[in-house]
Image (cartoon, rainbow, N blue to C red):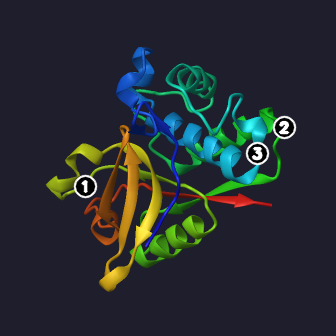
Amino acid sequence: MKELDYYTIDGALGWSQDWFRDWWMHLGGCAAVTACDVCIQLARVHGYKNLYPYDAQHVTRAEYEDFAMQMKPYLKPRRTGIDRLPIYIEGIRRFWHDRGVFSLDAEGLNGDLPWTAAWDLVRRQIDAALLVPCLLLHHRDKIFDDWQWHWFNLAGYDERGGAHLVRAVTYGQAFWLDLRALWDTGYEQKGGLIKLRMR
């Protein structure tokens, strides 16, 4: 079992999309939130200070919301959502480059690959203290109704007793999800994972 240390705001784990005052970000800012959290983690743990303009060790609600509005043009909410991995990758790359960071890259792992490939990616990224942005589109299992058409970060894994659980962080909370069940959506249109690389 391994869990990444995640920042907190007012006792909540990470940011809650419900806190946005901006209507579009409140409705569809989940991709931007995951990217903000990735940048905060990179600043806190890996020394990429250019990626978060405030104190990454003490994140406040006002500073985070200001930061999220800086991220918004790069991962702008839209009617169909950021529903493809390349849209996310292009946005976060542009954000990094505009802040003078060229030693980071991102690539996608599509949801049509075997779940074992996703499990391997999650373990490697978490072991390297890197968050894993995850996109879930439609899912046939009703247990994932609240997760559909949503971006969230994976920040831990647990394989004790043969389990394949991932720690998903969203809406100011953490949830343990079965990765194999999460991955088997039952739909042709897939989401997937984002792999971060430090060069």
CA separation, marks 3 and 1? 36 Å
Q: Is residue 24 above or below residue 178?
A: above
Q: Residue at x 35, y 26 (%)?
A: 18
Q: Residue 20 placed where, x, y %?
A: 42, 21
Q: Which residue is mark 3?
A: 48
CA separation, marks 3 and 2? 10 Å
Question: Callout 3, which amino acid?
Answer: Tyr
Circles 3 and 1: CB atoms closer than 8 Å: no
Q: Quadrant of the N terminus?
A: bottom left
Q: Quadrant of the C terminus?
A: bottom right
Q: Secondary structure at mark 3?
A: loop
Q: Secondary structure at mark 2?
A: loop
Question: Callout 1, which amino acid?
Answer: His
Q: Is residue 38 left or right of residue 30?
A: right
Q: Residue at x 54, y 70 (%)?
A: 121
Tell which circle, 3 or 1, labels the residue nearer the N-terminal end: 3
Tell which circle, 3 or 2, labels the residue nearer the N-terminal end: 3
Q: Residues within 10 Å of mark 2 (few under 14, many from 20)?
A: few
Q: Is residue 168 above or below residue 109?
A: above
Q: Residue at x 49, y 47 (%)?
A: 84
Q: Residue 117 placed where, x, y %?
A: 49, 75
Q: Residue at x 45, y 27 (%)?
A: 78
Instruction: Indicate which disc residue 70 carries.
Output: none
Q: Which residue is mark 1?
A: 139
Along the line of sight, the residue nearer the viewer: 188 or 98: 98
Tell which circle, 1 or 2, labels the residue nearer the N-terminal end: 2
Question: Callout 2, which amino acid?
Answer: Gly
Q: Quadrant of residue 115?
A: bottom left
Along the line of sight, the residue nearer the viewer: 7 or 145: 7
Single out the residue that lies furthest toward the bottom: 161
Q: Quadrant of residue 21?
A: top left
Instruction: Indicate which disc residue 100 carries.
Output: 2
